[in-house]
């Protein structure tokens, strides 16, 4: 598994197939990436006071972080300061 450094987290965002009203399937390359995902790993510098833990669903800033493909899955490595909210 990817282990981020410092105050970064690894987010997995599920690929959702989107269909237009006329039935055309839009590939993921033709649409904006979602701004929500699930935390799968956190850096060593993140503690309980930061309020984020593995398994949380989070909302993050658009265009934040670095996209990484690891073992065939897409992840986003993002600094904790770009996290806007944790969904309850």
Image (spheres, helix red, strand yellow):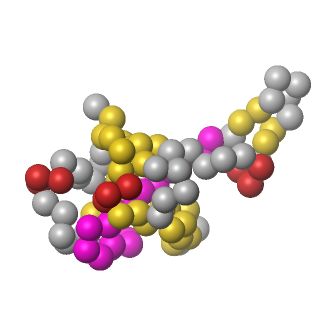
Residue drawn at point x = 41 percent, y = 43 percent: 59
**In this view of the protein, which residue sits in the foreground, 37 or 45?**
45
Residue 71 within the segment the image draws in magenta:
no
Q: Position of residue 58 (x, y in %)?
A: 37, 44
Residue drawn at point x = 27 percent, y = 53 percent: 54
Residue drawn at point x = 30 percent, y = 48 percent: 55
- Specify whether residue 41 is in view: no
Task: Give the answer, above or below, for where 42 lies relative to 60.
Answer: below
Residue 9 within the segment the image draws in magenta:
yes
Q: Position of residue 86 (x, y in %)?
A: 31, 40
* Residue 24 in the figure: left or right of residue 57: right
In this picture, which residue range is highlighted in magenta?
A: 1-16
Instruction: Quarter of the image for the C terminus: give it.
Output: top left
Task: Give the answer, above or below, for where 56 lies relative to 82.
Answer: above
* Residue 23 in the figure: left or right of residue 88: right
Task: Give the prevailing secondary structure in the magenta stretch.
Answer: loop
Instruction: Quarter of the image for the N terminus: give it.
Output: bottom left
Quadrant of the rendered image containing residue 42: bottom left
Q: Position of residue 11 (x, y in %)?
A: 42, 57
Task: Give the answer, above or below, for where 39 lies relative to 34.
Answer: below
């Amino acid at each position: 598994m990817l282990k981020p450094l410092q105050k970064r987290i690894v987010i997995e965002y599920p690929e959702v197939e989107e269909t237009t009203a006329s039935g055309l399937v839009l590939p993921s390359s033709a649409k904006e990436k979602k701004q929500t995902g699930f935390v799968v790993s956190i850096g060593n510098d993140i503690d309980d006071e930061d309020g984020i833990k593995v398994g949380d669903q989070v909302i993050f800033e658009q265009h934040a972080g670095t996209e990484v493909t690891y073992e065939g899955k897409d992840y986003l490595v993002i600094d904790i300061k770009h996290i806007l909210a944790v969904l309850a």
